[in-house]
Amino acid sequence: MYERAEARIDLGALRHNCRELKSRLAGGVELCPVLKADAYGHGALHCVSAVAEAGADRIAFATASEAVLARSVVPDVPLLVLGALAPAEIEMAISARADVAAWEPGFIATLADQAAAAGLVVGVHVKYDTGMGRLGTTDPELVLELARTAAAHPNLRLAAIWTHFATADEEDTTFRDLQRDRLAELGERARREFPEVKLHAANSAGLIADPASHFDMVRPGVAIYGMDPFGEDPADHNLRPVLSLHSWVASVKDFAPGMSAGYGRTWQAEHATRVAAIPIGYGDGVRRGLSNKGEVLIGGRRHPISGTVSMDNITADLGPGSKVRVGDEVTLIGSQGGETILAEQVAVPLGTINYEVTCGISPRVPRVGRDEGAAKEPRPGSGSR
Ligand SMILES: *Cc1c(COP(=O)(O)O)cnc(C)c1O
């Protein structure tokens, strides 16, 4: 039994996806799942343990505090912070024994000082901006210079030169190929000086679509959660959705024609029907843009979200004579009976992407880790509520 709503995290599916992705890599290529933003909304702690069990060679985050949290559950797995670090965060990253990204001489100097003060050696991944136009330096000579600095300093270790794709999910591969070739070309030069330096570039889309982009390590995020980087059906790539989002029916009412549900009376019954109120709303991350656009599953059938999504509740038109009762389970993302609502489908009427759908589930919703083959949750009984 659960309160209001819960997100179920199928850790078996998460491990399956990691193994599936790893099986696509040539021997020696490392798998570095990306667990930033609380594991794309899936709950970082249980996901960190699961990907470590499934053979992650390294785990990546966006921030130092995310790496610190992970370090508390995986004492030995190498970690990498991909994002920009404010000076105050460097110490945190060092204390988590995470490798860090760098592209700026002043930053490397501060990093070296702080690593020396801590008596530790920090791995440096020099970021080459080959076309994302965001973090990193676009200057290949500066990349090599920073690589030399990292290689020469006793408290730094040159770990990698890397880049990030802007268009790997698009059908036209021209720009992705250009970015990949820029990294390959610079990598070749770098390896003349530093034969051990690693290269990495691929996100989920690169991993799936272009084996030539795998280099020495891949950094899949969205695909390990069983979501499709191309916004289509994850089953096409043998990926299993990890997250499902559930609530339950708190009220069922008969509506006469003309009765309305929710703020602003944006939906009114055209004919006699029954309407369910469900205690989950935009305060839980069910976006208000789904008002009169989204769907839910109840009793194994799809029902429209009818009326405005409010902070704590939504309403759904059940149709006349519906047998749905108070306490019945509601699925907002996931499967019931033969029906499925994918995060990819929720994204469409919102004009967004699956990534934002799961990241947007708010902290009010507990993330409950479950395992493949675990006993099915008993259907919430109507009597006990
Ligand atoms: C988020 C992120 C990834 C993972 O991207 P997906 O599209 O989710 O696979 C990889 N690398 C960097 C630098 C990222 O920020």
Image (cartoon, helix red, strand yellow):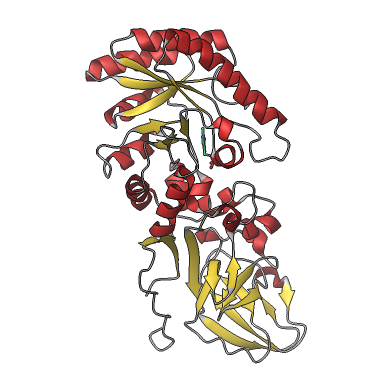
For residue 105, say whether it is visible.
Answer: no
Looking at the image, the residue that sits furthest to the front is: 27
Task: Give me the residue at 69% from left, 56% from top.
Answer: 348
**Quadrant holding the N terminus:** bottom left
Tell me what residue is drawn at x 45 percent, y 40 percent: 34
Image coords of residue 363 (percent x, y): 43, 55
Query: From the viewer's perspective, is residue 107 above or below residue 338?
Result: above
The answer to whether 70 appears left or right of 253 in the picture is left
Residue at the left extreme?
Answer: 119
Q: Residue at x 36, y 27 (%)?
A: 99
Task: Locate residue 57, reporting x and y percent.
Answer: 36, 37
Residue sitting at the far bottom:
321
Q: Nearer the viewer, residue 229 or 134?
A: 229
Q: Is residue 11 visible?
A: yes
Choose between 139 and 66: the one closer to the eye: 139
Residue 77 in picture, x, y percent from top left: 30, 37
Instruction: Report the front residue among 25 and 330.
Output: 25
Compared with 373, 159 (above or below) is above
Where does the C terminus fall, quadrant-wise?
bottom left
Which residue is outermost to the right? 270
Q: Nearer the viewer, residue 304 or 188?
A: 188
Residue 299 placement, left or right of 85: right
Query: Tag count in the figure?
Result: 0
Quarter where residue 291 is shown: bottom right
Q: Is residue 73 left or right of residue 65?
A: left
- Residue 71 in percent (x, y) is at 29, 39
